[in-house]
Image: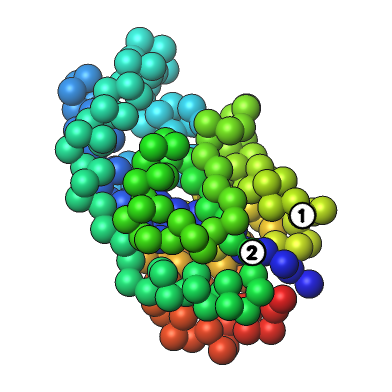
Amino acid sequence: MPKAIIFEVDGTLVDSNVLRARAWQESLARYGVQVRLPRVLAQLGREGDRFLSALLSEEDYLRHADELTSYHRALFHEEYLARVRPFLGVTELLQRLRDEGWRIALASSAEPDELEHYIELLGVADLIDARTTDAEVEGHRLNEEIPAEAIRLLGLDGTDEALTVAALPHDIEGAVRLGLRCLGLVCGGFSEEDLRGAGAMAVFGSPQDLLARYAESPLATEP
């Protein structure tokens, strides 16, 4: 039976997806690329450089990708990070999981300092056993490598011992490819149909909804 639960963070525990997409939209516009916000949102969570290659022409990608990524990072930190808010119920949900014997990891494609900011914002530092970001992994299959690193940090033997919770279809797809069972949350901006289509075994509205419906969720019978 599973011994641990791995949470994605952006769009799952904190309401950051639209803000991050707006920062990308503004960054792209600075380089003369106009992209509608829904299109940017749809690409969030894509592996590695596939995010920008889905939004830029090949010529623009080769000319601007690195500089654009750096500009976005600075813009998000300066203009948007302070506006990120936690979803309701996160601390209470993690506390209940700890009380029932779960080990908890946070796995995020955010920058390490962003993840630390989110942990402080949520007030959950004493409730988590491991944390990881793309800074701790190498390669381009981040949707698989980041949760895989969380499994390693938790000292688990394999994916059968963990569940994951995510709000982005690309993150769910990566977790499923890794062999993890995944719960989806629609608070990240995607529909239940989107998340089930990506492979989520069950879908809830938000952390607070998952907590309120805990008894009917897959968490109630495990570990």
Residue 167 visible in rendering: no
**Residue 25 vertical placement versus 208 (above, below):** above
For marks 1 and 2, the one nearer the N-term is 2
The C terminus: image quadrant = bottom right
Q: Residue furthest top?
A: 63
Q: Which residue is mark 1?
A: 156
In front of the other: 136 or 140: 136
Q: Residue most toward the front?
A: 126
Residue 188, above or below 55? below
Classify residue 73 by image quadrant: top left
Q: Amino acid at mark 1?
A: Leu
What element does badge 1 sit on? loop
Which residue is pictured at 38% across the width and 74% down the height?
89
**Disc number at residue 103?**
2
Q: Which mark is residue 72?
A: none
Across and down, in percent, residue 101 comes to: 66, 74
Residue 196, image x, y percentages: 55, 67
Q: Quadrant of the N terminus?
A: bottom right
Q: Identify the residue at the far bottom of this view.
A: 215
Residue drawn at point x = 38 percent, y = 19 percent: 65
The crowding category of the residue bearing disc 1, from other C-alpha atoms within 10 Å (few below 14, some 14 to 19, many at least 20), is: some
Left or right of 218: which side holds 159?
right
- Asked whether the viewer can see residue 176, the reply is yes
Q: Position of residue 136 (x, y in %)?
A: 58, 33
- The answer to whether the residue labelled 1 contacts the one labelled 2, judged by CB atoms less than 8 Å apart, is no
| Image point (59%, 61%), residue name | 104
- Residue at 75 percent across and 51 percent down: it is 155
The quarter of the picture where residue 138 lies is top right
